[in-house]
Structures are given as C-alpha cells and as structure tokens.
Image (cartoon, rainbow, N blue to C red):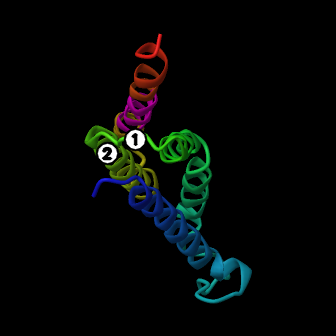
Amino acid sequence: MDNLVVPMFAHVLLCTFLYMLLTFVRAPKVWGIGRNDDGSNPFDAIQSKISANLSNQFEWPLFFHVICVVLIVKGLELQPIYVALAWVFVVGRIVHSMVQIITSNIKLRGIVFMLNFLAVLAMWGLFIAETVVVQS
C-alpha cells in the first residue's frame, strides 16, 4: 500500500480497542458487573496499566500523525520508506501496548518504544532532508 492513511487508521483502531478494554476492566467498579465476592474489581492490577497506555497513545504518536498529515497535504511523491516506517511505528505501538499491559518489563518496553520513536524521527528526518536540505 502506498499511502499513509491505512497505518494512521490502524493506530486509531488500536486506540479504539484500548478504550473498549479500559471500559471492560472498569465495569466491575463502575457498574458492579463482574465484581469479586468481596466487592473488589478483579482487574484492578491491569486497569492502571491500560489507562497509562491509552494516555501514551496521545503523546509521541501525535508526531506520527502530524508527519503523515504533512506528507499527505504536501502531495509529494511518497517514497515507500515512509509507508514502511509508518507500519514499523504502528506495529511497534501494538507491541508496546501488549508489553506495558501484560508485563512489568520496563527494559523491553523501553526497547519497543525506541523503535517507535526512531521510526517517527526517521520520517521527520527524511521529510526535512527532502524539503529543506535538498531545496537549499
């Protein structure tokens, strides 16, 4: 696929899934559905992880969506490397979410985040190189 809209939408779907998951794990506390016999929420341990991960989706990913929109609006001939980096970012975000929610492995989470970070940084670097440096 030679456009950035599909990976952008894939990230939107990830966020949608996280909102749905957060709603599900909060149900015992909010609506009393699925409470433990003692009235506690069986999902307390992961609720905060999901919430934190969802918040993370609106931090660095902002720069991903901005560069994608800039590239789309500029109407430049899109190099395949941009789409590949966009997919590296999206797949990395999915893996990052899984690591953050399912484990407590901070080192692995940091490595996965670094891949996301570098993919977006590379997209910006390529764009700057194509539009600012080459035109100078």
Query: In percent of the image, x 45 and y 50: which residue is there?
Result: 100
Q: Nearer the viewer, residue 78 or 114?
A: 78
Query: In percent of the image, x 49 and y 47: which residue is there?
Result: 72
Residue 43, relative to residue 78: is it above or below?
A: below
Query: In percent of the image, x 58 and y 69: which residue is there?
Result: 19
Residue 126, relative to residue 13: is it above or below?
A: above
Query: In percent of the image, x 42 and y 47: which residue is there?
Result: 104
Q: Which residue is mark 1?
A: 109
Q: Position of residue 64 (x, y in %)?
A: 50, 42
Q: Position of residue 116 (x, y in %)?
A: 40, 39
Q: Which residue is mark 2?
A: 88
Q: Secondary structure at mark 2?
A: helix
Q: Is residue 117 magenta?
A: yes
Task: Tell me the mark number nearer the camera, choosing from 2 and 1.
Answer: 2
**In the rendered image, which quarter contains the N terminus?**
bottom left
Q: How many numbered dots are placed on residues in this image?
A: 2
Dot 1, how many residues are within 10 Å of its Cα: few (below 14), some (14-19), or many (20+)? some
Q: Secondary structure at mark 1?
A: helix
Q: Is residue 96 magenta?
A: no
Main SS type for the magenta part? helix
Tag 1: amino acid: Arg
Residue 15: which disc? none
Residue range (magenta): 114-124
Closer to the chain start, of discs 2 and 1, is: 2
Q: Position of residue 123 (x, y in %)?
A: 41, 33
Q: Position of residue 45 (x, y in %)?
A: 54, 62
